[in-house]
Amino acid sequence: MGDEPLAIAIDSTPEPAPGRVWCRLCGRPLTGAESRRTGLGPACDAKLHPPGPDIRTRRHEVEQDTLPGVHGPFGAETPDGPDGPA
């Protein structure tokens, strides 16, 4: 029992798997095709590239004067005529 060679050398280190891609930010292994292509996992990619603001949140109503020659709301003339009641 004492003279038999060991199957695995004690000081050997495991070889990395071929084709394995690691996240450039946190070092975790990447499994998704898009993550492997960019080199970043989904959580790290979201940290570096946050989504832009929603454009609808920046819109607001503005008070405007009526344009000359426009009578009534949305350019419609009033039932009494273009100059109002007679």
Image: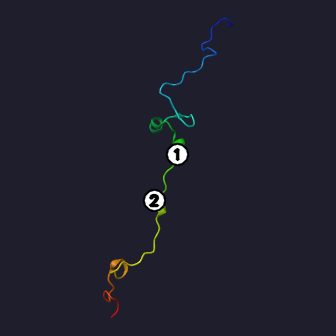
Q: Residue at x 34, y 80 (%)?
A: 68
When the figure is inspected, residue 63 is found, relative to residue 17, above or below; the finding is: below
Mark 1: which amino acid? Ala
Which residue extends farthest bottom?
Answer: 86
Q: Residues within 10 Å of mark 1 (few under 14, many from 20)?
A: few
Query: Of 14 and 79, which appears nearest the observer?
Result: 79
Which of label 1 and label 2 is nearer to you?
Answer: 2
The type of colouring in the image is: rainbow
Across and down, in percent, residue 30 comes to 51, 35
When the figure is inspected, residue 19 is found, relative to residue 53, above or below; the finding is: above
Q: Earlier in the sequence, mark 1 or mark 2?
A: 1
Question: Which element is circle 2 on?
Answer: helix
Q: Can you tell which mark lies on residue 4? A: none
Query: Of 4 and 20, which appears nearest the observer?
Result: 20
Instruction: State the quadrant of the C terminus.
Output: bottom left
Report whether 71 appears left or right of 36. left
Across and down, in percent, residue 76 comes to 32, 80
Question: Which element is circle 1 on?
Answer: helix
Q: Can you tell which mark lies on residue 46? A: 1
Query: Of 4 and 21, which appears nearest the observer?
Result: 21
Report whether 60 appears left or right of 26. left
Which residue extends farthest right?
Answer: 2
Q: Residue at x 52, y 45 (%)?
A: 46
Q: Which residue is mark 2?
A: 55
Report whether 9 appears left or right of 51. right
Q: Residues within 10 Å of mark 2 (few under 14, many from 20)?
A: few
Across and down, in percent, residue 9 comes to 61, 14
Which residue extends farthest left?
Answer: 81
